[in-house]
Amino acid sequence: MNIKFTPNRTAKILLVIVLFIIIAIAYKKRKKLKKTAMNTINYIKQKTWDIYSNRRIDTLHPDIRAKTKEFIIRAEKELGIKLRVTSALRTWQEQNRLYKKGRSVSGKIVTNAKAGESYHNYGLAFDVVEIKNGKALWNNPNWQKIGNLGKSLGFEWGGDWKRFKDKPHFQKRFGKHHTTLAKLYKSGQRKGNYVLFS
Ligand SMILES: [Zn+2]
C-alpha cells in the first residue's frame, strides 16, 4: 500500500517555534536557578557589618541563615540601613523562663508564648533594629522599608500582624504551624534545636 504523506508546512514551522520557546524558557529558568543558588552560597559565606548579628544569625535554623544574612547585607547596601539582629534562637528553656516572668516569678509580663509556641524556639524567627550613631531606633520611620525588604526575601513580617504588631520580628514558617513544629520537636525529628522538615 502506498500512503502518500504530505507534510503540512505550517504545522512543521509551528512545531519548531513551540520547541524553540520551550527550550528558551528552560534555559532561562536554569540560568535563574543557578543565579539564586550562587547568591545563597555567597551570602552564607559573607559577613554582615555587625559582629553581634553574625553570631546571632549562626544560632538560627540552617535553612534561614543565608536569607537572614542577605537581608542584613542588602539593607545596608540598598537602603543604607544598618540592621542589628537583636534576638534569634530562643531555646525552650529560655522561653519557659521568660513566660514565668510576671506570672510565677515577679516582674512584668514579657511574652504570651509558652515554650514551643514561638518561632524563635525553632530558630525560625529573629528580631532586628536599625542602629544609627550607636543607638537602636525602635521608633523608626524606616520600618515599612525594612519590612518590605524582609518580605521580598520570603519572610513574614510582624509589622503586618493585625492584633499585635511586632515590627522588629521576622519569621519563616515553611508552611508549618508551631503546634506541628512542637510535635516534630518532641518526637525527636530534630538536630539539636532545629526541627528537620523531611
Ligand atoms: Zn521576635
Image: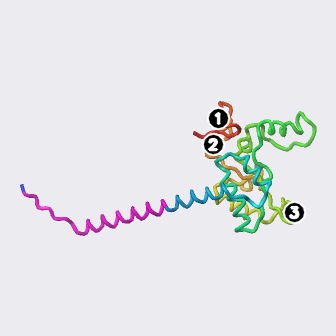
Residue denoted by label 1: 184
Instruction: Tell me if residue 177 comes above or below residue 74 in the rendering.
Output: above
**Mark 1 nearby-residue class (10 Å; few <14, some 14–19, many ≥20):** some
Q: Which mark is residue 33?
A: none
Q: In this view, does 43 lie to the left or right of 131?
A: left
**Mark 2 nearby-residue class (10 Å; few <14, some 14–19, many ≥20):** few
Residue denoted by label 2: 176
Residue type pointed to by label 1:
Leu
* Position of residue 15 measured from the top left corner of the image (x, y, whole percent): 30, 64
Dividing the picture into quadrants, the one containing residue 49 is bottom right
Q: Is the magenta stretch mostly helix, strand or loop?
A: helix
User: Tag 1, which secondary structure?
Assistant: helix
Instruction: Tell me if residue 35 comes above or below residue 158 in the rendering.
Output: below
Instruction: Tell me if residue 193 comes above or below residue 166 in the rendering.
Output: above
Which quarter of the rendering shows the N terminus? bottom left
Of labels 1 and 3, the one closer to you = 3
Q: Residues in magenta?
A: 2-30
**Mark 3 nearby-residue class (10 Å; few <14, some 14–19, many ≥20):** few
Q: How far apart are marks 3 and 2 (CA)?
A: 37 Å
* Position of residue 197 measured from the top left corner of the image (x, y, whole percent): 60, 40
Residue denoted by label 3: 134
Marks 3 and 2 close (CB-CB < 8 Å): no
The answer to whether residue 85 is seen in the rendering is yes
Q: Does the magenta stretch include residue 27?
A: yes
Q: How many labels does the image show?
A: 3
Residue type pointed to by label 3:
Gly
User: Tag 2, which secondary structure?
Assistant: loop
* Position of residue 128 measured from the top left corner of the image (x, y, whole percent): 77, 56
Q: How far apart are marks 1 and 3 (CA)?
A: 40 Å
* Residue at the farthest top position: 187
* Residue at the farthest front position: 45
User: Tag 3, which secondary structure?
Assistant: loop
